[in-house]
Image: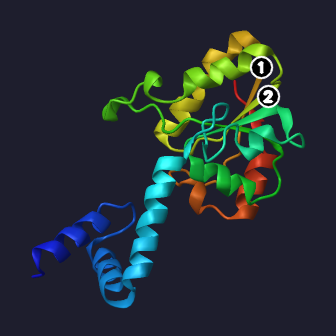
Amino acid sequence: MYSPMIETLIEQFAQLPGIGRKSAERIAFYLLDSMSKDEVEHMSKVISYAKNSVLFCEECQNLTDISPCPICSSPKRDKSVICVVEEPKDVSAIEKTGQYNGLYHVLHGVISPIDNVSPDDIRIKELLRRLSDETVREVIMATNPTVNGTATAVYIKRLLKPMGIKVTRIAHGIPIGSDLEYADEVTLSKALEGRTEMN
């Protein structure tokens, strides 16, 4: 229906999460028809610069442009508590609540045998390394309340049991099967407040 170049552009946008064919078409035509060449070049440079400059924080594994990241290096954060989340966007969701003042650890996924994702494929080793200095007294498991998110939380709890660290799980004010990024601040606040120790 479209020229090969336009079709290729649409296909590239359609690969982004949450972008279907119709949205990809709208983005492509907005870029081609409504944006100036300078604006497109600027956007391209920003994307390229971000991709080349953003890295993983050496401590929490969150995406950042300086390492350690501002959260890990802040003297105002409670370094005795680490909240474990699946993805960087989950850090942002919890930060918006204003109810949590500890540190984070980003796993970059969950254990999923059906998808061939093993414990070695996510950032569990990095978490264990952080806990070796005995500063941390509590680990909050804030993985999504899905089958894989729960299984990952239970797996990590078993690894931490010999260390004597208290492991809690956020309360299920978050609906089963949903993602943290879609939860509102009040729901997330209540989930954090109502966390329970994992057995």
Mark 1 and mark 2 in contact? Answer it, CB < 8 Å.
yes
Above or below for 125 versus 143: above
Label 1 is placed on what type of residue? Ile
In the rendered structure, the answer to whether residue 171 lies left or right of residue 8 reads right
As drawn, the residue found furthest toward the top would be 162
- Image coordinates for residue 14, horizontal then vertical, percent: 29, 66
Q: Name the residue under label 2.
A: 138
CA gap, disc 1 and disc 2: 6 Å
Please state, as top left, top right, bottom left or bottom right, where the C terminus lies in the image. Answer: top right
Nearer to us in this view, 166 or 61 = 61
As drawn, the residue found furthest toward the bottom would be 34
- Image coordinates for residue 73, horizontal then vertical, percent: 79, 39
Above or below for 74 versus 126: below
Rendered residue at 64%/19% (across/down):
128
Local crowd at mark 2 within 10 Å, few (<14), some, or many (≥20)? some
| SS at mark 1 in the image | loop
Q: Residue 180 carries which label?
A: none
Q: Mark 1 points at which residue?
A: 165
Label 2 is placed on what type of residue? Glu
In the rendered structure, the answer to whether residue 66 lies left or right of residue 29 reads right
User: Can residue 155 be seen in this snapshot?
Assistant: no
| SS at mark 2 in the image | strand
Tell which circle, 1 or 2, labels the residue nearer the N-terminal end: 2
Nearer to us in this view, 27 or 151 = 27
Rendered residue at 66%/56% (across/down):
93
In the rendered structure, the answer to whether residue 124 lies left or right of residue 68 reads left
